[in-house]
Image (cartoon, helix red, strand yellow):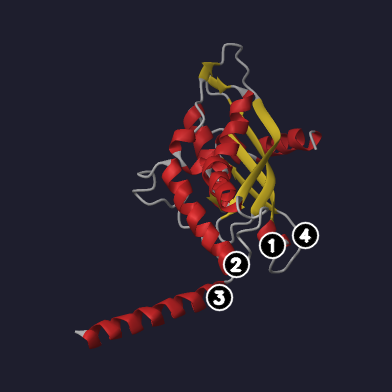
Amino acid sequence: MLKTCKNLLKKNAMNNQIEKELFELLGDEHQMTSAETPLRPDAFEKSDAEKMNTIEKHFHMIMEEMGLDMTDDSLRGTPHRVAKMFIQEIFSGLNPANKPKISVFENSYHYDKMLVEANIRFNSTCEHHFLPIIGKAHVGYVSNGKVIGLSKLNRIVDYFARRPQVQERMIMQVFNELKTVLNTEDVMVVIEAEHLCVSSRGIKDSSSFTSTIQYGGIFNEKENRDDFFNLVNKEK
């Protein structure tokens, strides 16, 4: 039995090493597996307070492991601040309870052309290195009889930004949410962002940014996409 256990431990250690080597080979070449954020079924069984308490303990250990003096007045409160920031602020979009309440109204003024909200600023976090993604989104739609308040467009972008993200997933989430809320395919979303995992580590290229685009309905026609970009560029 002891020999079997030792063999299993050795096998697991080898598998872990192979996995780490695979991650190193992949580098930044990651693939998005779904438009849904990957969450465990039990993701929200613990309260926010319980999660913050656990994160605080683990982050204290991380700081200690890096050799920091955790008795220093400047550092003692950092684990608590980080835990609070993770749960209540920058990753608050993970919890469906924080999803913005979106009221839909009848398009009583019968406006039947595109509406564009440009330069919606957001802050997100790269799920591969937990470094900031700083960017702006441009969203547009044509009413199918329903409209939403302009600030709700900003809130939808902010909600999906406040979680560990990849830009390709985020744009799909915003796009799909707008289609569902507005009950229309006539939606277009563009996201432009700087990824600090590119600008502050790795290649350290601070001049590049990443653009993604998603659209449907009338925006499949180039003329309508051109109109969208003309409106966006006027606001830059």
- Residue at (37%, 52%) from the top-left corner? 40
Residue that carries the numbered disc 1 in the rendered image: 198
Q: Amino acid at mark 4?
A: Ser
Residue that carries the numbered disc 4 in the rendered image: 206
Indicate the secondary structure of the residue bearing disc 2. loop
Marks 1/2: CA distance? Answer: 9 Å
In the rendered image, the vertical position of residue 164 relative to residue 96, given as above or below: below
Say which of 149 and 226 sits in front.
149
CB-based contact (under 8 Å), mark 4 and mark 2 = no
The numbered mark, 4 or 1, whose residue comes first in the sequence reads 1
- Residue at (51%, 21%) from the top-left corner? 103
| The C terminus - image quarter | top right
Marks 2/3: CA distance? Answer: 9 Å
Indicate the secondary structure of the residue bearing disc 4. loop
Residue that carries the numbered disc 2 in the rendered image: 28
In the rendered image, the vertical position of residue 129 relative to residue 224, given as above or below: below
Q: Amino acid at mark 3?
A: Glu
Q: Amino acid at mark 2?
A: Asp
